[in-house]
Image (spheres, helix red, strand yellow):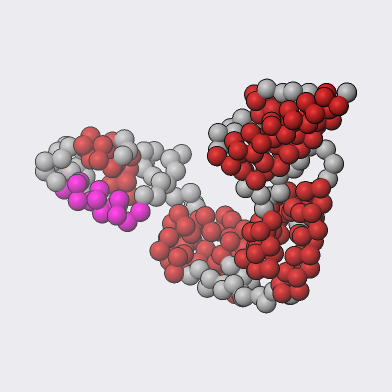
Amino acid sequence: MSRVQAFGHLWEARLSHLWEDENVSLREIARQLGVDPMTIKRHASRLDLPFPRPVSRTCRLNEAQKLRSPFRGMPEQSMLGEYQARWISALQEYQGMGVKFIRGKFPKLYEWLYRHDTAWLKAHLPTRLRAHRQVSPVDWQQRDQQLAQLVEISAQRLRHQAGKPTQITLAAIGRDIGQLGLLQQHLPKLPAVAQLLGSLVETREAFAIRRIQWVTQHYEAERYHPTRWEFIKRAGIERIAAERTVSEALDEALCKVNFHISGDMKVR
C-alpha cells in the first residue's frame, strides 16, 4: 500500500503550475520537484489535476497506484481537527510549561501536526517562559576578603616550598587552595583577589631567575663547575635563556658558583 508523502503547500502549488505548462515534460516536472514521475502522477491525482495533462497523453492511475491516506475510515480533515483538539487539550493540561516539555509528553501528536499542518502548530505553541533573574545568595565582598588572605598565604607557601620551584600562577594558587574554578570563572567579582594576583603571579622571566637561584645553590653545595649549557639545561630555561634579564642573571650565577668553588679550593 502506498503511503502519503506530504511536501507542503508550496510544493503542491509548484506541481499544479508545472502540470499545465506546455513546455515541461513529466520527467522534467519530476526532476524539478525532486521525485520520480510516478510520484508526480500520484500527487496530481490526489490534487484532482486534469488527466491526461493538457499538453501530453498522461495515462490515468489505477486504484492500486493512487496515494491512500494512512487513516482509513476517517476523512483527513476530521483527523486534523481531532489532533488539533488533542494538542489544545495538552496545552491546557500543562499550562505554563514550555514546548519541549509538552512535546516530550506527546511526541507522536507533535510529529503528526508538524507534518500535516506546521503553520497551525507554530501558531499554537506555548508562550516562551521568561527566565527569572535570581538574586545571588553569595556575599562576594566577604568572599573576596577571605580568598585574598588565602591567596597571599598560598603564594608564600609555593615560593618557599622545598624541592624544585613551582611557578606562581593563578592556576597553581587556585589548585593549592582548592578554588581553581572559582578564580577562573568569577575573578571579576573578586577585585581584591584580582589585584593581589597581579602582584604575586610570576612572569616567565621572573620564574626563570628564581630557578637559576635554585640551581646555583645546588652547584655550590656540590662544588661543581658547570658549563653555561649545563646550567641552562638543569634550570630548564632553554627557551628563555636569551632574554636579557635572564641572561644577565645566568652570567651572575655562573660567576658566583665559580668564585665560591674556587675560594673553597684555595682555602684547602
What stretch of residues is rendered in magenta? Answer: 8-20
Q: In screen coordinates, is 220 left or right of 212? A: right
Q: Is residue 2 above or below residue 48?
A: above
Which residue reaches farthest right? 268
Res 185 seen here: no
Q: Is residue 182 above or below residue 25?
A: below
Q: Is residue 17 above or below residue 137?
A: above
Q: Nearer the viewer, residue 13 or 76?
A: 13
Q: Residue at x 26, y 54 (%)?
A: 13
Q: Is residue 115 magenta?
A: no
Q: Is residue 18 magenta?
A: yes
Q: In screen coordinates, is 119 left or right of 187? A: left
Res 153 seen here: yes
Q: In screen coordinates, is 120 left or right of 34? A: right
Q: Residue at x 24, y 50 (%)?
A: 14
Q: Is residue 64 above or below residue 94?
A: above
Q: Residue at x 32, y 56 (%)?
A: 9
Q: Quadrant of the C terminus?
A: top right
Query: What x and y, as percent, mark residue 29?
Result: 23, 40
Query: What x and y, as percent, mark residue 226?
Result: 72, 23
Q: In screen coordinates, is 262 left or right of 20? A: right
Please name the predominant secondary structure of the magenta segment in the image: helix
Query: What x and y, as percent, mark residue 60?
Result: 26, 40
